[in-house]
Image (tube, rainbow, N blue to C red):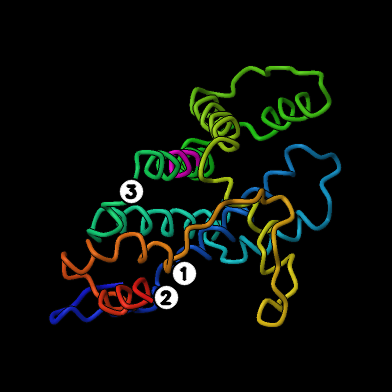
Amino acid sequence: MQLREGGKLTYHWEKWLWLAALAFHYSFLVIFLRHLRFFTDPVPGIIQWLERADSFFEMGLPGILLSDFVVVAAATYLFIRRIIIPQVKYVSLPADYFALFLILAIVITGMLMRYVWRVDIVSIKQLTMGLATFHPTVPSGLGVLFFVHLFLVSTLFAYFPFSKLMHMGGIFLSPTRNLPNNNRMVRHINPWDYPVKLHTYEAYENEFREKMVEAGIPVEKPLEGMEEEKAE
């Protein structure tokens, strides 16, 4: 939404925002599902198929996972958008930046372990399977980067229920998904609403008509008409 010259209010479709948001959410979902291979033995076939589909763009060893680079690009775009567009920057809170930085840090440390400083996947699976089966073990030789990555992931899980990231619940609680689309024919009243004493505009105008006229605020019923009604 923008206010242009002459007081004209215009709207435009944020297609780049929607594209980046869709790319971010779906790639993050793929990354989350791929990591289930560390917590399952044997690994389900659907997870193996998902990993092969994600790494179909073979370049070197290990194969490049497209979801890694897509989520970094999308999150970077969402961050840049917050600091470049004045309206978005004005309404942005520290919590908005914290979530973006936390997710970026998780993905980047994971990419560093995969493409730059390799880690022992067998040892990692031994640790994660120990956590999943409530028999924790800490193998040697995992490296500092893995524990930094694990700390960031744990921070995200702890922060998630108390943050704006819980908008995920809207998938299941959205009125457009759960309520019938017949509000033009049927009036839906919230059964939990307690009775509230309403102050209608007509009553408001009757109470403040003289002051509104003095201030130059337009009224529906002229002051002269009200005086004639009172006289009758």
From which residue to which does the magenta span run?
102-106
Helix, strand or loop at label 2? It is helix
Side of 216 where 89 appears, left or right: right
Residue at (35, 43) in percent of width and height = 93
* Residue at figure coordinates x 51%, y 45% from the top left: 164
Residue 138 appears at what percent x and percent y? 68, 17
Characterize the local packing of mark 3: few (<14), some (14-19) or many (20 or more) Cα atoms within 10 angstroms.
few
What residue sits right under mark 1 in the picture?
A: 18
Q: Nearer the viewer, residue 71 or 11?
A: 11
The label nearer to you, 3 versus 1, is 3
Q: CA distance from mark 3 to mark 1?
A: 18 Å
Front label number (3 vs 2) = 3
Say which residue label 3 marks: 92
Mark 2, residue position: 15
Q: Residues within 10 Å of mark 2 (few under 14, many from 20)?
A: few
Corner quadrant of residue 96: top left
Q: Position of residue 115 (x, y in %)?
A: 49, 45
Q: Residue at x 74, y 65 (%)?
A: 178
The circle on residue 108 is none
